[in-house]
């Protein structure tokens, strides 16, 4: 895959204003990145959100993240490993409400919600097959009347 410049990455992410909104900073800061480069922590955050903008296939990104993240990792350790500073940033990466992520205990293992499992690169839980609404449905047979 191609190795885009920082300016191309910003354009692929929607431009200066959109990147500033995502990172919760002012647009002039992002504009400066076009010449000085995207700071490493911001780059990692943006790459987690949109690996395609960096010329990385989502499968490759998931493998790279999986190598960094352990499924028994605490929320605090997960944030630190991914270079995220708050629950709000982690929630954004996972696509979950901030309140849900904030409710997770800091030192317990992260919950096995589908978004976390996808981030960790593990397969999600399989859904149980739908049960028929009538438990006797398979025992009912047609009756021929004379």
Image (cartoon, rainbow, N blue to C red):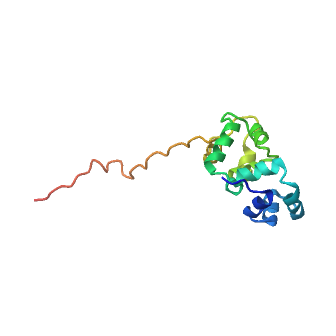
Residue 142, picture quadrant? bottom left
Residue located farthest toward the front when viewing the structure as drawn: 2
Residue located farthest toward the left when viewing the structure as drawn: 146
Where 49 falls versus 75 (above or below)? below
Q: Nearer the viewer, residue 30 or 86?
A: 30
Q: Nearer the viewer, residue 145 or 49?
A: 49
Q: Viewed as shown, does residue 24 lie left or right of 110?
A: right
The answer to whether residue 95 is visible is no
Where 118 falls versus 77 (above or below)? below
The answer to whether residue 133 is visible is yes
Where 73 falls versus 82 (above or below)? above
Q: Viewed as shown, does residue 77 lie left or right of 129?
A: right
Q: Residue at x 82, y 47 (%)?
A: 41
Q: Nearer the viewer, residue 31 or 119?
A: 31
- The x, y position of residue 32, in whole percent, is 89, 60
Count of numbered marks? 0
Quadrant where the C terminus is found in the figure:
bottom left
- The x, y position of residue 139, in whole percent, is 27, 47
Q: Residue at x 26, y 51 (%)?
A: 140
Q: Viewed as shown, does residue 139 lie left or right of 96?
A: left
- The x, y position of residue 51, in whole percent, is 69, 53
Residue 107, picture quadrant? top right
- The x, y position of residue 53, in whole percent, is 70, 57
């Amino acid at each position: 895959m191609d190795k885009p410049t920082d300016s191309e990455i910003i354009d692929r992410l929607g431009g200066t204003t959109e990147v500033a909104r995502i990172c919760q900073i002012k647009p002039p800061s992002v504009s400066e990145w076009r010449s000085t480069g995207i700071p490493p922590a911001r780059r990692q955050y943006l790459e987690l959100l949109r690996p395609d903008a960096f010329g990385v296939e989502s499968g490759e990104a998931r493998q790279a993240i999986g190598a960094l993240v352990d499924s028994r990792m605490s929320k605090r350790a997960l944030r630190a490993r991914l270079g995220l500073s708050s629950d709000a940033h982690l929630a954004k990466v996972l696509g979950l409400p901030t309140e849900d992520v904030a409710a997770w205990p800091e030192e317990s293992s992260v919950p096995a919600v589908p978004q976390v499992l996808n981030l960790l690169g593990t397969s999600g839980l399989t859904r149980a097959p739908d049960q028929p609404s009538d438990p006797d449905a398979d025992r009912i047979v047609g009756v021929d009347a004379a």
